[in-house]
Image (cartoon, grey):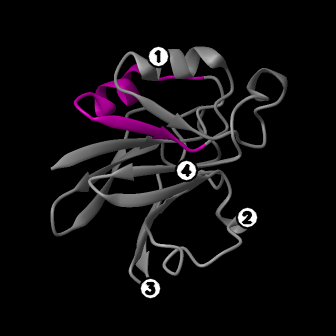
Amino acid sequence: MTVVGVISDTHGLLRPSAVAALRGCAAIVHAGDIGRPEVLEGLRAVAPVTVVRGNVDLKWAGDLPDRSEVTIGGRRCYVLHNLKDLEFDPREAGFAVVISGHSHVPKIEERDAVLYVNPGSAGPRRFRLPIAVARIEFRRGSIEATSIELPV
């Protein structure tokens, strides 16, 4: 089994509780709106990081991709910040997982044999939305995601 941590919309804040929730992961995916490069430095101290640029990641993040792919346990994962920008059928393209952020709303759902994971926001609280990250467990015969609500 391989466990991947998923975080998004940190907006410059890397909470100790988020770091604790991601410890033990083989890799971390940040789905954009990072806010500051120090957030990525902190995550890289935990595990290797795949990252995409979000809509608030301006000058400092110009070298970061808008979209990325990562293969875990032989399964392809597609990463982008805003799911509304997905312009193809991920199942037809051979992706098992689509990871996104942007909405600040944690959501895990399977559609057409593809697992969609939005960890929600791990940054400053927005409205009454939870502060959260996610973990995805890649097993030989299955992929399961769990949302982890963090203390404020």
Disc sitting over residue 85 in the figure: 2
Ranked by sequence position, the earlier of labels 1 and 4 is: 1
Relative height, residue 50 to residue 142 (above, below): above
Q: Which residue is mark 4?
A: 129
Relative height, residue 123 to residue 82 (above, below): above
Q: CA distance from mark 2 to mark 3?
A: 18 Å
- Report the span colored magenta: 13-31
Ranked by sequence position, the earlier of labels 3 and 4 is: 3
The residue at the point 30 percent across, 58 percent down is 74
Q: CA distance from mark 3 to mark 1?
A: 35 Å
Asked if the residues shown at circle 3 and circle 4 are in contact, with their CB atoms under 8 angstroms apart, the answer is no
Task: Please tell me which residue lies in front, 79 or 72.
Answer: 72
Asked if the residues shown at circle 1 and circle 2 are in contact, with their CB atoms under 8 angstroms apart, the answer is no
Q: Which residue is mark 1?
A: 42
Ranked by sequence position, the earlier of labels 3 and 1 is: 1
Task: Please tell me which residue lies in front, 107 or 1.
Answer: 1
Ranked by sequence position, the earlier of labels 2 and 3 is: 2
> Is residue 125 on the magenta stretch?
no
Tell me residue 52's x, y (percent).
63, 41
